[in-house]
Image (spheres, helix red, strand yellow):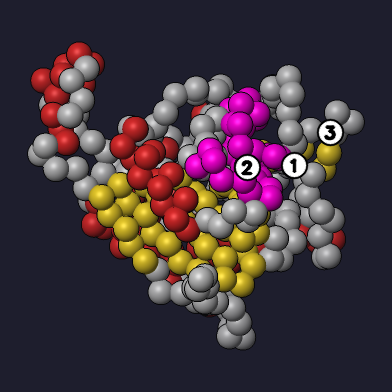
Amino acid sequence: MFPIHSKPKPWHPPIAANPRTSCSVLSKNNILIIPRKISSSLDENKELANQNQPKAAGRIKRLVLTNEGRTKLNMFPDREFYAYPRFVTHVDDGFIATLTDLYRERLRPGSEILDLMSSWVSHLPKEVVYKRVVGHGLNAQELARNPRLDYFFVKDLNQDQKLEMEDGSFDAVLCTVSVQYLQQPEKVFAEVFRVLRPGGAFIVSFSNRLFYEKAISAWRDGTGYSRVQLVLQYFQCIEGFTQPEVIRKLPTSGNAQDDKSPFNWFMRLLGLFSGSDPFYAVIAYKNFKPVYE
């Protein structure tokens, strides 16, 4: 069990309408416990691809990844890898500023938001008030430090993709620099579709940074273009998402010279850092894209 912050804000999920979907319990200390026995095998993927499902919003139309494409170099459970908190930022200030501006533009005040695969840093604009922000991740200490989270829960989406939340619970779902670690993205995107309200947005953002040994094979050795195409396919394999929109902000030669710190100078000298982090975001909506006056 993970240690948690001295003032945790655990997420207490509502009781699901179908008791068979419930896969989490609360301990006597009100800490969310996720069972280790999970069913998300590759055989299930084959069965899912072959079964005849009626056409309905939210269903998985096809599988995007092959079995090989889902593999990782580090095959140990993700919860072990993230057992200790990492109080660092994984992208640069330019990426964060671009993402915050995007959220300011696309997320309406008073919205209810689910931040998937979150951490101790919030990218939401500080001046905007939201009705509720629920965070998800793999390290309770990091999530407890996130100042924008009203609640959080710990869950390994590579072992169990089911979100213990009612249908249509959120106006927006966010996933920041983490989509590259999902081994069952089709199921996760289907769950996101389910918990979104009609017109709700799913914003997936990423750069070129990653924990190489924990990224899936289909992502690991790809390019910026191929990774955008992969996320597009994740959206397109779910019945009911709108046509995805792609936003790119790539570094220019001038950007590489903006940061004059000794660290960045040294990294560029070694050829390990070439300037600003590229910004990619892929956005789609449940059923329709809302128009606001």
Res 11 label:
1
238 vs 119, nearest the viewer = 119
Q: Element type at marker 2?
A: strand
Q: CA distance from mark 2 to mark 1?
A: 8 Å
Quadrant hosting residue 100? top left
Residue indicated by mark 2 = 135
Q: Position of residue 61 (x, y in %)?
A: 50, 76
42 vs 231, nearest the viewer = 231
Taking the spot 32% from the left edge, 51% from the top edge, the residue there is 280
Q: Position of residue 116 (x, y in %)?
A: 56, 47
Q: What residue range appears in magenta?
A: 125-152
Q: Earlier in the sequence, mark 2 or mark 1?
A: 1
Q: CA distance from mark 3 to mark 2?
A: 17 Å
Name the amino acid type tagged 3.
Asn
Q: Residues within 10 Å of mark 2 (few under 14, many from 20)?
A: many
How many numbered tags mark residues here?
3
Depth check, mark 3 against mark 2: the one in front is 2
Name the amino acid type tagged 1.
Trp
Q: Element type at marker 3?
A: loop
Residue 73: tell me if it is visible: no
Taking the spot 41% from the left edge, 52% from the top edge, the residue there is 102
Residue indicated by mark 3 = 30
Task: Kindly check if marks 2 and 1 are in contact, taking CB atoms under 8 A apart as contact.
Answer: yes
Q: Is residue 284 above or below residue 143?
A: below
49 vs 177, nearest the viewer = 177
116 left or right, relative to 28? left
